[in-house]
Amino acid sequence: MNDDIRRYLDDEIGLDDLGGNARDEAEAWERLLAAFRAEAADAPPPPWLEERVMAEIRGLPEPRALARALGWLVRPLSIRVPPLAAGVAVAAVAAVLLWSGRGPTPTDVPEGSPTVVYVQFELKAPGARSVAVGGDFDGWSGTNALEDPDGDGVWTGRVAVQPGLHAYMFLVDGSDWVTDPEANHYADDGFGNRNAVLAVAAPAT
Amino acid sequence: MAPPAERTDAQVVRDVLDGDRDAYRMLVRRYGSVLHAHALRMAGSEDEAGDLVQQAFVKGYRKLASCRDPERVGAWLFRILANLARDHVRSPRRKDISLQALPEIPAAPDGPEDEAARAEVRQRLRRALDRLTPEQQEAFVLKHVEGRSYEEIAAVMDLSVAALKMRVHRAREALQGLLREFA
């Protein structure tokens, strides 16, 4: 397929932009695609759909109760970690996740608060009007704004999180959730999206 | 409070999350047709499509608390369905039955010979579509059968627009070759 036909089928150029042979080929493609559309299966949803869905969900816990139960299972521990135990926790996390040095960087343990670690997040998003980070550490509120003071398209910011494993994503322009392309690890969110996963080791105090 | 049919998607989601389980029925009514149309085009069988849509709505209910943009819960449900349909097309068992389970097309007003020819064309198109990879099939159906924009499809398939265009291009080339083979 020549490049003009490809561009035509991708709506980048119109039929009038094509020359003789290419125009004939484009029209042949239109006939073929029209055949696919005409022969595509189409039918209303089955009449039983609504009642079967409602019958099935009646036997389920309410969605918030489900989320609370799951959240309890995965919520990171926030207990104060003594030095020896902290070392064990770091080793355990490292053994599971094989920290590679990419992704957000836990830094700057605040004094007197060994259960919180500041994590530096960074996303390259040239042209974005705003970038924030959200995750299970803030209820996916997306209110932790990153900044790009020099306008180079690299947005950064620090967020306090507790030690543990955290799923997170970036919120670009207030509406688009974007997976961190530089994350160390990812987890399926169950809907075909990948959440980035951050491992924060308990500080050794 | 607005009658159920006038409540926005975000209000319906909030109602469900606040414990009004029956409010979920409104989402099934609003988005059942769109989800079913896509499921049918991917699966090729009304029975399988109905099951997929039921699964998608039940999964959507279970995960509703994690829907990050309730105003766009329809797009969110569509994405759940699209993932289920893609997995379904991948399953090896399904390839064996899809040709026997072609949905019926209403009889044409012309004679029985025309109808036989239409059925033959329909079967060749379906066979060609079934020979694509599940990812190519999904991209092609969303773009050229359902007429969705590349930006919209990219969000559903979690791809860049450039990668998606390449996938659709490969699907068209594969279809061209397959239809020549079936001619």
Image: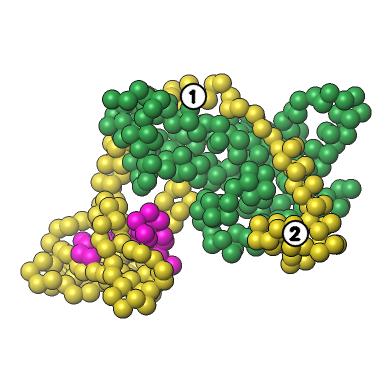
Chain colours: A yellow, B green
- Given the image, what chain letter belongs to the residue carrying mark 1? A
Quarter occupied by residue A125: bottom left
Q: Which residue is mark 1?
A: A50
Indicate whether A126 appears above or below B14. below
Residue A16, x across and y down, in percent:
75, 59
Q: Quadrant of the C terminus of chain A?
A: bottom left
- Given the image, what chain letter belongs to the residue carrying mark 2? A
Instruction: Tell me, yes or no, whether the highlighted magenta stretch contains residue A168.
Output: yes
For image coordinates 80% across by 52% down, the residue present is A27
Report if residue A90 is visible in the image. Answer: no
Q: Residue type at mark 1?
A: Glu
Indicate whether A178 appears above or below B27. below
For image coordinates 17% across by 57% down, the residue present is A78
Q: Which residue is mark 2?
A: A16
Q: Are marks 2 and 1 in contact (CB under 8 Å)?
A: no
Q: A9 left or right of B49? A: right
Quarter occupied by residue A58: top left
In the image, the segment drawn in magenta is A159-182
For image coordinates 60% across by 39% down, the residue present is B38
Of the two numbered discs 2 and 1 in the rendering, the one whose residue sits closer to the viewer? 2
Q: Residue type at mark 2?
A: Asp
For image coordinates 36% across by 47% down, the residue present is B68
Residue B143, x across and y down, in percent:
64, 50
Decide which of B92, A193 is in the foreground and name it.
A193
SS type, badge 2: helix
- Label 1: few (<14), some or many (≥20) within 10 Å? some
